[in-house]
């Protein structure tokens, strides 16, 4: 077995003249939770897009379990155990909560009937049981984030990429979402990479961290080490825009 579940090696992503990621390295050990820190525009979402396979590196390589997946399609990566949630949630608004989750399950080749029951488990796990048969358009921002989580879980991931999962969520609901994320790691052994701006949240969640700025890795290490770095303190503990 490879030592790392995910290896991002010297990945550069260019959009025309813009270098969104500049020779980025990220190494994720199985069972650990890694935080990706950085101001707006740092390249955090682009990094997730590259790992999920919806954005193609200009150079560099990405491996899962030591196997190169740099050229693999997003669907292949999903079957291999990579799932992600979106910063801007994208539910099928006309479908019910359960049906949204069924879409992810059916895409694994599971039959409809079974998918209905399995979907109910994930919907309940994320605390949306009472909303099971409501259209997704009726959900609040926090509820949409939970639905995103349920849809990601429905692909049975080993590696889960969470993009600002508490963003736009009302403060009182945040601890519950964090608790869910901790349970994913502790009860289901899912390896998590999380983009999150709230430092308090991260201290209770992340083992390791990477701080990106303008597409470059500035610091990498344990969550505590990275949080101590002056560039990180300036942005997160000062009056920066994060
Ligand atoms: N599909 C794209 N096409 C062109 N530019 C993009 C695209 N996606 C992201 N960018 C640019 O890449 C940079 C990094 O963006 P992003 O990864 O979304 O940052 P973050 O998630 O850290 O806020 C930004 O300057 C953004 O405008
Ligand atoms: Mg982003």
Image (cartoon, grey):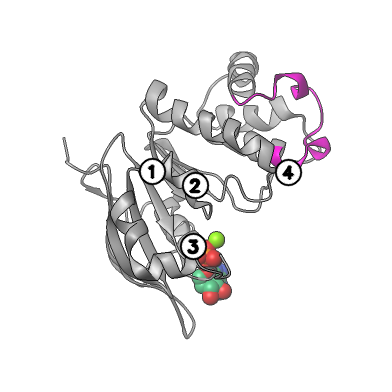
The residue under label 4 is 141
Q: Residue at x 25, y 42 (%)?
A: 29
Instruction: Tell which circle, 3 or 4, labels the residue nearer the N-terminal end.
Output: 4
Residue 193 is a magenta residue:
no
Residue underneath mark 2: 200
The alpha-carbon separation of the residues under discs 1 and 3 comes to 16 Å
To which quarter of the image does residue 40 belong? bottom right
Question: Of tags 1 and 3, which is closer to the observer?
Answer: 3
The tag earlier along the polypeptide, 2 or 1, is 2
Give the secondary structure at mark 4: helix
- Residues in magenta? 126-142
Q: Earlier in the sequence, mark 2 or mark 3?
A: 2
Depth-wise, is mark 2 or mark 4 nearer the camera? 2
Q: Image quadrant for the C terminus?
A: bottom right
Badge number at residue 109: none
Q: In this figure, which residue is indicated by the disc labeled 3? A: 236
First-in-chain label (2 vs 4): 4
Q: Earlier in the sequence, mark 1 or mark 4?
A: 4
| Callout 3 crowding tier (Cα within 10 Å): few <14, some 14–19, many ≥20 | some
- In percent of width and height, residue 63 lies at 27, 51
Say which of 67 and 191 sits in front: 191
Tag 2's secondary structure? Answer: helix
Q: Position of residue 216 (x, y in %)?
A: 35, 72
Location of residue 61 with respect to 132 vertically, above or below: below
**Most extreme residue toward the front, as rendered?**
238
**Residue 25 visible in the picture:** no
Disc 1 crowd rating (10 Å Cα; few below 14, some 14-19, many 20+) is many
Comparing labels 3 and 4, the label whose residue is closer to the camera: 3
Q: Nearer the viewer, residue 179 or 108?
A: 179
Q: How many angstroms separate mark 2 from mark 1 (CA)?
A: 10 Å
Residue 219 image offset from top left, x and y in percent: 30, 65
């Amino acid at each position: 077995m490879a030592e790392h579940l995910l290896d991002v090696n010297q990945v550069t992503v260019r959009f025309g003249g813009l270098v969104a990621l500049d020779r980025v390295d990220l190494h994720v050990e199985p069972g650990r939770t890694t935080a990706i820190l950085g101001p707006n525009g740092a390249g955090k979402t682009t990094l997730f897009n590259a790992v999920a396979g919806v954005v193609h590196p200009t150079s560099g390589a990405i491996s899962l379990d030591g196997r190169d997946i740099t050229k693999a399609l997003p669907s292949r990566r999903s079957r291999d155990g990579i799932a992600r949630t979106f910063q801007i949630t994208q539910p099928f608004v006309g479908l019910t909560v359960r049906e949204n989750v069924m879409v992810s399950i059916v895409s694994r080749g599971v039959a409809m009937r079974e998918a209905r029951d399995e979907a109910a488990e994930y919907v309940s796990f994320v605390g949306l049981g009472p909303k099971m048969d409501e259209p997704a358009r009726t959900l609040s921002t926090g509820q949409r984030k939970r639905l995103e989580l349920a849809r990601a879980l429905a692909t049975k991931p080993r590696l889960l990429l969470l993009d600002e999962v508490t963003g736009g969520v009302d403060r009182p609901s945040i601890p519950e979402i964090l608790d869910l994320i901790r349970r994913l790691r502790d009860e289901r052994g899912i390896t998590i990479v999380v983009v999150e701006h709230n430092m308090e949240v991260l201290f209770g969640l992340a083992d390791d961290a990477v701080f990106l700025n303008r597409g470059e890795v500035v610091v990498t290490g344990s969550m505590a080490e990275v949080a101590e770095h002056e560039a990180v303190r300036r942005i997160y503990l000062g009056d920066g825009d994060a």
